[in-house]
Amino acid sequence: MIGRRHPSHYQTLALELLTQHPAQGSSVAESTRLPPVALRQLVQEHYDFIWRLLSRLGVVGAEVDDAAQQVFMVLVTRQDLSIKPGSERAFLYGVALRVAKEFRRKAQSSQNHVAPDPERLVDAAPDLEAVAARNQARRQLDRILERMPDSLKEAFILFELEDLTVPQIAALLAIPTGTVASRLRRARAVFQTEVAQLRNTTSRLQSASSDETSES
């Protein structure tokens, strides 16, 4: 499962931004905003879910907190916002998808324009080995998820990683349960194929490395 550092700090910050300073960056009349009590409840109930979702949708770790706050800021910046009771998570989920896409686009653009930092090219093998040992499974999962079509990725993340049921996912995505089940089957097939390919690649690399060591 994905964890996050100092969760209470960022959740508290989101609560402060939304309930104590709702007019910041917004031209929405106070009378048309959700009441502070409703805002606080939405953040408390859904912040962790949205944070994990953004992280799994490819938002860079250092920016997940900013992205999560941006999702919830929609609650105070959208004119005459009305969320049907019981559909709060579905609404925030839709916002999170758009926010994650925008953050990925910005990150890709930044990578295309920033020159490599020489300091980051210095060999730091011990540190890299320690990080690889801790994060190998997560990196591999991320690579597999990146290759999945978005519709399959959503179903896989919500069912396998967030432990939602098929009916819950259907309600969240506003699609039939049969569609969710079909997407899950296809997502699992893609996942299994990618895992098999990854294992084959790892095996070939280890074999090649072993052969080179023997020859030397």
Image (spheres, rainbow, N blue to C red):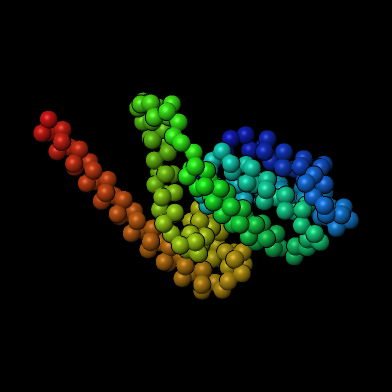
Foreground of the two, 28 or 87: 28
What residue appears at the point 79 percent right and 50 percent down from the top-left corner? 26
Image point (43%, 26%), residue name: 119
User: Residue 91's quadrant in the figure?
Assistant: bottom right
Q: Nearer the viewer, residue 166 or 192?
A: 192
Query: Compared to 83, does 214 lie above or below?
Result: above
Q: Residue at x 89, y 56 (%)?
A: 31
* Occupied quadrant, residue 98: bottom right
Q: Residue furthest right?
A: 31
Q: Is residue 182 above or below residue 17?
A: below
Between 72 and 79, the one lying in front of the other is 79
User: Which of the two residues, 146 or 56, is positioned nearer the viewer here?
Assistant: 146
Instruction: Report how many numbered discs are placed on residues in the image.
Output: 0
Which residue appears at 41% of the width and 66% of the height? 186
Q: Please tell me whether residue 24 is drawn above or below residue 146 in the rendered image.
A: above
Instruction: Determine if residue 216 is in view.
Output: yes
* Residue 80 versus residue 13 in the image, above or below: below
- The x and y percentages for residue 59 are 54, 47
Where's the C terminus, which quadrant? top left
Percent from the top left, x then y, of residue 202?
27, 45
Q: Is residue 54 visible?
A: no
Is 199 on the left-hand or right-hand side of 50?
Answer: left
Give coordinates of residue 190: x percent, y percent: 38, 61
Residue 107: percent from left, percent from top: 53, 45
177 displayed left or right of 118 = right
Is residue 77 toward the left or the right of residue 199 in the image? Answer: right
- Which residue is situated farthest in the left direction here? 215
